[in-house]
Amino acid sequence: MIEGLSINLATIREQCDMEEAVEACLRHGITAIAPWRDQIAKIGLDRAAKLVEMHDLTVTGVCRGGMFPAADAAGRAAALEDNRRAVDEAVALKADCLVLVVGGLPPGSKDIAGARQMVEDGIAALAEYALAQNVALAIEPLHPMYAADRACVNTLSHALDICDRVGEGVGVAVDVYHVWWDPDLAAQVARAGHRIFAHHICDWLVPTHDLLLDRGMMGDGVIDLPGIRRMIEGAGFHGHQEVEIFSRDNWWKRPADEVLSTCVERYQAIKAATA
């Protein structure tokens, strides 16, 4: 068993459905996963939960909730209802957290302050429901390049400000791809402390050919992964490192077993460098 390593199933989404991905992970001694909701839906929630139970898997997160902003009240209400369903899925899989990719500007809008308020209002409305079911909500700040369409929360500082205001049960997912560049990263990781619910790893390639679908395998880019891991451990988080790689032209074209064996090798290198 590879202790401390989780595979976000986006990493092999083009090669495997969820059931096949679980089987592939187990072949490599990986017993922690983070599925996406479309992958869960494809095989059915009952079957997904059975796989988790049957193989005694750790689910480090369900991806994703969020996408709160909308052009009207009906749209915001629909988003909240979908997020409640996401909480229910996290419950069924006994997930460590529900990751929130919060959403950007509603169509036709240029009001980013308004979108950010909708995000905070949506998280606050969801938090009571999630807390009652013991599901942690992990706000994932995304790189500013995604502010318009995917996430208008772009720094750990902003995410933690929301956590401060919303309160219990809300924390952050620290994805190195999105935060490695932040000059305030060390201070904000320390501030996050026990509110770090997930830690996602990959690498930033130079050059990057596609800002969404050209993530690098750990060690192939410019991110100081051992350094960030030391920050996170110093803040008190000693949970799994979750590999999440979107790679349309490289890793998604390789056999799943090759991808996973490389993930194990690179993870062990980070772990050795952090020791």
Image: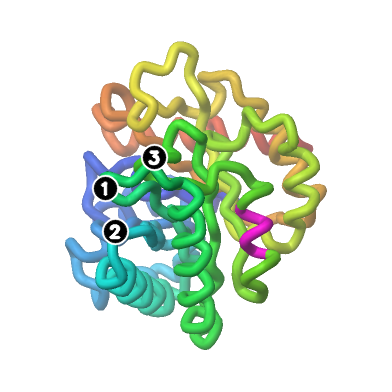
- Upstream in sequence: badge 2 or badge 3: 2
> Which is nearer the eye, 37 or 110?
110
Q: Where is the C terminus found, in terms of image quarters?
A: top right
Q: Which residue is at a point 57% across and 53% down the rendered structure image?
A: 173
Q: Which residues are magenta?
A: 159-163
Type of the residue with mark 1: Pro
Q: Would you say residue 91 is visible in this rendering? A: yes
Name the residue located 48 percent from the left edge and 42 percent from the top edge.
243
Q: Which residue is mark 3?
A: 148
| Helix, strand or loop for disc 3 | loop
Q: Amino acid at mark 2?
A: Ala
Q: Amino acid at mark 3?
A: Ala
Q: Which residue is mark 1?
A: 107
Indicate which disc, 2 or 1, sits on the residue closer to the N terminus.
Answer: 2
Find residue 94 and report its horizontal and vertical position in percent. Answer: 46, 75
Are there few (<14), some (14-19), or many (20+) residues within 10 Å of tag 1?
Answer: few
